[in-house]
């Protein structure tokens, strides 16, 4: 592992000033659950390690006038225990329940999970269904970008070296159903091979009046699936309808990825997990 200088700024202004001068040679660290692994493996070789884990500006979960704020420095344990998320983004809270181990959840942050841009990142599908914007800060000011403009490819974060992810603005939703599910190689402490997140609302007639769905770990980046949402919208959910949507989802996924050796497993697994997750709506 290459030698580096460890830097802990006292506040956001100090952190941004440092990045403005040394950003190209700097790696940002919060929980370190991804960065430290990459450091030890020699995947990254920064001159400086900038610790933002104690910056107050990156903390907090609260409902604001512009949406639901989740700070980039919020840990997965804090997400899991949040009553605000239980009310306004339950799928995001649910994803934290199966995120790695309890020890990792205590230090891993949502900002780090997103910035790592892994296709199997647990927090990204729930953020996608809430149309999340990423709040970014640099010495030039603060700006917002849609999440998909930041997570541009597998392990590819499309942000300049001089910017820090401050947090995320989600569109809160009052829903009757929401969930996050994933499949790994084992039941615990496993990286997702397939992950899904959805939220929905049924009206007084039992029809789906609102539906958002995202699939992770199966395409280069987690994404929303409008064709699946449109198929279910305005209809009373039945077992046959959900299976029809599940088959459509797997077909569209294969159109993007092509048929691979893993498709023999993933095609039925995606369908089965989708039906299992949505069956409570029937």
Image (spheres, helix red, strand yellow):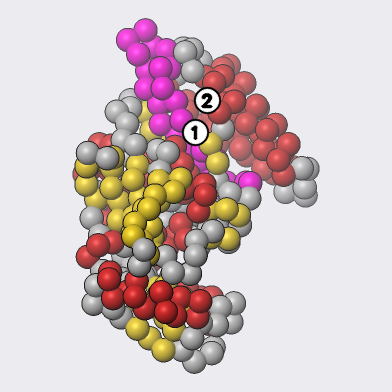
**Magenta-drawn segment:** 193-219
Quarter of the image where the N terminus is located = bottom right
Q: Is residue 213 magenta?
A: yes
The residue carrying pointer 1 sits among few (fewer than 14), some (14 to 19) or many (20 or more) residues within 10 Å by Cα, namely many
Q: Residue at x 58, y 60 (%)?
A: 156
Q: Nearer the viewer, residue 167 or 244?
A: 167
Numbered disc 2: secondary structure: helix
In this view, the residue farthest toward the top is 205
Drawn side of residue 98 relative to residue 116, left or right: left
Q: Earlier in the sequence, mark 1 or mark 2?
A: 1
Q: Is residue 40 above or below residue 180?
A: below
Q: Is residue 244 above or below residue 46?
A: above
Quarter of the image where the C terminus is located = top left
Drawn side of residue 267 relative to residue 30, left or right: right
What is the magenta segment's predominant secondary structure?
A: strand
Drawn side of residue 263 relative to residue 245, left or right: right
Question: In the rendered image, is residue 36 in sight?
Answer: no
Q: Residue at x 53, y 53 (%)?
A: 151
- The number of numbered discs placed on residues in the rendered structure image is 2
Drawn side of residue 227 relative to residue 162, left or right: right
Provide residue 155's location: percent of width, then percent of height: 58, 61
Do labels 1 and 2 touch, CB within 8 Å?
yes
Question: In the rendered image, is residue 25 in sight?
Answer: yes
Mark drawn on residue 213: 1
Q: Is residue 114 above or below residue 1?
A: above
Q: Nearer the viewer, residue 268 or 203?
A: 203
Q: Is residue 211 magenta?
A: yes
Q: Residue at x 56, y 19 (%)?
A: 231
Provide residue 103's location: percent of width, then percent of height: 34, 67
From the image, tell me which residue sits under label 2: 229
């Amino acid at each position: 592992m290459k030698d580096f200088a460890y830097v802990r700024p006292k506040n956001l202004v100090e952190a941004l000033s440092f990045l403005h001068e040394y950003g190209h040679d700097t790696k940002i660290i919060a929980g370190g659950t991804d960065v430290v692994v990459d450091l030890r493996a020699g995947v990254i070789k920064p001159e400086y390690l900038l610790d933002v884990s104690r910056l107050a500006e990156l903390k907090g979960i609260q409902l604001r006038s512009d949406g639901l704020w989740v700070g980039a420095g919020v840990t997965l344990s804090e997400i899991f225990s949040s009553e605000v998320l239980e009310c306004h983004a339950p799928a995001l809270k649910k994803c934290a329940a199966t995120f790695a181990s309890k020890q990792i959840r205590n230090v891993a942050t949502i900002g780090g999970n997103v910035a790592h841009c892994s296709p199997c990142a647990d927090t990204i599908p729930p953020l996608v269904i809430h149309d999340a914007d990423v709040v970014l800060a640099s010495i030039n000011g603060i700006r917002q970008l849609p999440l998909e403009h930041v997570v541009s490819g597998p392990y590819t974060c499309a942000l300049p070296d001089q910017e820090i992810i401050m947090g995320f603005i989600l569109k809160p939703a009052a829903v009757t159903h929401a969930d996050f599910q994933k499949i790994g190689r084992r039941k615990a402490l496993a990286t997702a091979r397939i992950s899904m997140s959805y939220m929905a609302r049924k009206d007084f007639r039992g029809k789906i009046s609102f539906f958002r769905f995202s699939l992770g770990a199966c395409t280069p980046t987690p994404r929303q699936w409008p064709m699946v949402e449109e198929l279910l919208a305005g209809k009373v959910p039945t077992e046959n309808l959900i299976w029809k949507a599940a088959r459509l989802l797997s077909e569209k996924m294969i159109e993007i990825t092509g048929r691979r050796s893993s498709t023999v497993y993933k095609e039925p697994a995606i369908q089965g997990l989708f039906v299992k997750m949505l069956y409570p709506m029937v």
